[in-house]
Amino acid sequence: MSTTPRLREEDRELLIALLSQARRPLTTAELVAAFRATLAERAGQPQSSTRSAEEE
Amino acid sequence: MPETLETVAAPSFQGSEEEQRLAAQVWALLRATGRFFPETAPIRAPLSALVDYFAQTDPSHSAPEWEAQIRQSVQQNPHVFILEDDAETGTTFVITTRAGRAPTPQPEVDVAHMLPRRFQDAPPATAVRPRRAAPTTAPAETAKVAAETATPVAETVVDPLALDEATLERLIIDELSQSPEIAHFGDQWMLEEDVPRLSRGDLRRLRDYILEQGKPLSDVELVEVILGIRQTSPDFSVYQFGLNYRLAQEGDFEFVGVPGLALWTTKGAPGVTTKRRAADIGQDYRFLLDEPIPTEAPSEPVVDHVLTFYEHYLGVLPYDATLAPLLPKPVLPDQRVAVLTFESPQTYETFPVELRYPSGNRGGYLAGFEAFFQANLVPGALITIERTDEPGHYLIEFLPISPRDEKLLTLDEKRNRYVFRQVSYRCAVQEQMLLSENRYPKLAGQSPLDERTRRSPDRVLAVTFERVGEQIGTPAQPRYMALLDDLLAVANVERPMTAELIAQVVHDHPDEFSVDPDAEGVYYYTPKEA
């Protein structure tokens, strides 16, 4: 049994889209930052919020 | 299986930065485990399962350390987690909910005999406790079920926003490095289809240029000179990545760079040469593979080292637990060699050194110091090696002293005999490692051991006892006594031997070797009867 957590398929697609948009090499740190920023933007709220969208 | 994108914010965690980060990870893992649970239903996992997961994914901490850290982080956040001990099984559970709030313990109400239930359930009076994880925090049965569901914690799909930076980074690296449509080199990533290709002509010109220059060349130089792309061009980084990525797939080229400096060499280009074959030196250092290399960078960028006869003669240094943390890690997983530069400010010289990484059954070492050692140092010399801010560039220094003349051990290569020659040297030495005629007269005229004997640390140790030990037995039944310092200095004439290796050999061959139980550093050797 694998012991590694996996990303969701749509997250993987987002990473590919980010690389495709960049059209230049991205470092892991740049890619992670862009990935986080896009997800946070899609979630429509700051990451530090203590209440989930589902609760609301 | 694809899931819909969930937008759940992480709860706010308390404690130190480290505790907050760990608490967020624990919560994300629990949340992933119970991703189909209702918002307020308790999600529980055995603390031991979490400890196993963290210990496996980050072995820099031991399991007990992880357990202490997880407990601390969880206890710092009672609004998110509950720690529960199951007295029956002795298991500790960490419990939270998908909403990120600690579950409220529900009062146990016996509903089995309530009227509405008696109309619904048959037979009512013998109803057993629920087997599925129910929204309560206590029963032992649910704990068992939870233990089963919690075990796959590690293989679940996770919410990236709930992960800390390091975990997410590792996850992305794992995920992307398995994707054929993505090109990566070192720490950089690009879509494969966007990476410039190298023509056969490019490859030939690159190879010829490296051979012409006679040394490994940087990606920057190769892109500028051979591909004709200026550093000021907006596409320079794309071509630089393309060159590195494509050359890494070509059998004729070898990456010998370090983090921050990509260097390439090619088949037939001159490298560092040694008096012994590279593979044989790697074999000699095989015992270093058993030595754990610290993963953390040393706090000080300088290390001291006392030169042995073996190192001085071959111009090598070990890739051991002391030196390795100071040296660059391989950029590519299968990287064999990194070419470094060593500068000696005292002699105004800079020379290339090959860091040959451990591989298979060969230990790692640095090669290329032969001329520097022969010209400036003697076996026993104390040297310091310092890392600089420049990638792959190091300083090597020794402590200068007034000239000292002494008869020291050297190998007469023509006669293949050890001899003592008058040597004048100007470097500080560690006296115990200095091979002077006064200390080891018996070495004069001895021949180097044959290859088969040299390979075997126990045979080398036996011969070393005979060369430096005091015979305390009888002529018919000899027995030798020697001090560790002497064994260390003289065994290293033939092959690399550390004090740890000597102790290991003694431990593994109790029929021949023994340690004095009363005197520190005193060893004995009793030859086996032929």
Image (tube, coloured by chain):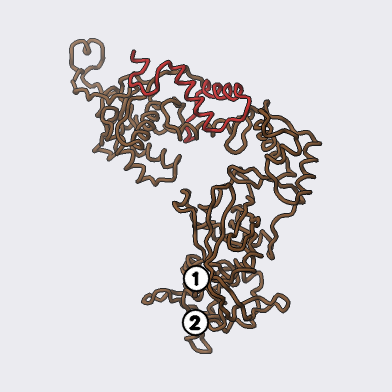
Which is more N-terminal, label 1 or label 2? 2
Per the image, label 2 sits on a secondary structure element best described as strand
Q: Evaluate whether residue B458 shows in this view.
A: no
> Compared with residue B498, is residue B17 higher up or lower down, i.e. above or below?
above
**Residue wearing tag 2:** B480
Q: Residue at x 53, y 89 (%)?
A: B475
Q: Evaluate whether residue B84 shows in this view.
A: yes
State the red chain.
Answer: A
Same chain for the residues under marks 2 and 1 in the image: yes
State the brown chain.
Answer: B
Three-letter amino acid code at the position of disc 1: His
User: Counting other residues with Cα less than 10 Å from the Cα at mark 2, is it few (<14), some (14-19), or many (20 or more)?
Assistant: many
> Compared with residue B292, is residue B118 higher up or lower down, i.e. above or below?
above
Where residue B416 sits: x, y (%)? 70, 77
Give the chain letter at badge 2: B
Where residue B144 sits: x, y (%)? 32, 32
**Residue wearing tag 1:** B509
In the picture, measured across the screen, residue B311 lies left or right of residue B469, that is right
**Comparing marks 2 and 1, which lies closer to the viewer?**
2
Q: Residue at x 47, y 36 (%)?
A: A3
Q: Residue at x 71, y 37 (%)?
A: B223
> Compared with residue B388, is residue B187 higher up or lower down, i.e. above or below?
above
**Marks 2 and 1: CB-CB under 8 Å?**
no
For the C terminus of chain B, the image quarter is bottom right
Where residue B503 sits: x, y (%)? 47, 68
Query: Of all residues shown, which one is farthest toward the bottom?
Result: B475
